[in-house]
């Protein structure tokens, strides 16, 4: 696996994980209605769920590679289209100013124990079909199906993505009570979504052009 591929993977992973989605809302809401440790527990719980999805995606894609190169290519093309969809959706949300990180009184009213927050995070992550679909869509974009170490590459990238995702979630847990409880929360969210959307659209275009050559 080339260093340029890993670098592009890291940039794409950070762009995706910085988009304020349901996981970020879950983390920030727990930070604001509890304390920082609640946000950290939520982040780690989600991270544990990501590891489950990593293993499922790696073994599933590995089996697909062995059974049919054509089907793997179909999954890869659909994955590229899904990344494009995520990018365009983020740009639309940025343009419309539709922030997903809005604090309200109900968000701050219910306090849950740290252990329960962690457990809920694992369950929310593992049982989310969108997360599973994302792993299947994202990982194939960065491996060479003809490589003898394709399974190993999938595992490395999957673990790297999980680590980056958990790191971004921890950042959100630290910033949740500071930034996203302020009146400027929508502005911060809008800027993050716009930048991440541009990178995802660019990544999709790069994948399309590279495959057409």
Image (cartoon, rainbow, N blue to C red):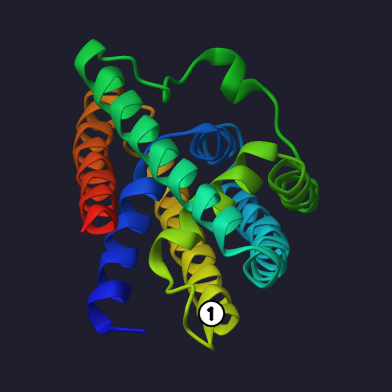
The number of discs equals 1
Image position of 206 (left or right of 145)? left
Residue 207: % across, % down: 28, 53
| Horizontal arrangement in the rendering, residue 63 relative to residue 31 (left or right) | right
Residue drawn at (24%, 39%), measured in percent from left and top?
201
Residues 108 and 213: in front is 213
In the rendering, at what x and y percent does residue 145 appear?
A: 49, 73
Q: Secondary structure at mark 1?
A: helix
Q: Residue at x 62, y 37 (%)?
A: 130
| Residue 157: x %, y % from top left | 48, 72
Residue positioned most to the top: 96
* Rendering coords of residue 149 (x, y %): 53, 87
63 above or below 121?
Answer: below
Q: Which quarter of the figure is the N terminus placed in?
A: bottom left
Name the image quarter holding residue 120. top right
Q: Residues within 10 Å of mark 1 (few under 14, many from 20)?
A: some
* Residue appearing at x 29%, y 27% in the figure: 88
- Which quadrant of the view contains residue 45? bottom right
**Residue farthest to the bottom, as pictured:** 148
Mark yes or no: residue 40 visible.
no
Is residue 92 visible in the rendered structure shown here? yes
Task: State whether residue 136 is above or below residue 10.
Answer: above
Front residue of 201/20: it is 201
Residue at 32% over, 75% down: 6
Quadrant that contains the C terminus: bottom left
Which residue in the structure is indicated by mark 1? 150
* Residue 7 appears left or right of 34: left
Nearest the viewer among 124 and 10 is: 10
């Amino acid at each position: 696996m080339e260093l340029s591929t890993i670098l592009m993977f890291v940039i794409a992973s950070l762009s995706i994980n910085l988009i304020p989605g349901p996981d970020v809302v879950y983390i920030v809401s727990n930070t604001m209605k509890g304390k920082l440790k609640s946000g950290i527990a939520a982040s780690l719980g989600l991270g544990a769920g990501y590891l489950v999805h990593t293993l499922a995606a790696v073994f599933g894609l590995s089996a697909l590679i062995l059974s049919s190169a054509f089907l793997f290519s179909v999954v890869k093309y659909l994955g590229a289209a899904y990344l494009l969809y995520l990018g365009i959706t983020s740009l639309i949300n940025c343009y419309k100013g539709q922030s997903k990180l809005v604090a309200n009184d109900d968000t701050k009213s219910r306090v849950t124990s740290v252990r329960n927050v962690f457990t809920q995070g694992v369950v929310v992550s593992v049982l989310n079909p969108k997360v599973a679909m994302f792993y299947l869509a994202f990982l194939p974009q960065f491996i060479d199906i003809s490589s003898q170490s394709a399974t190993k590459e999938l595992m490395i990238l999957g673990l790297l993505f999980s680590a980056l995702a958990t790191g971004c979630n921890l950042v959100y847990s630290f910033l949740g009570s500071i930034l996203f409880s302020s009146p400027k929360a929508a502005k911060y969210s809008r800027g993050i979504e716009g930048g991440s959307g541009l990178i995802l659209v660019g990544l999709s275009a790069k994948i399309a052009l590279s495959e057409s050559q």
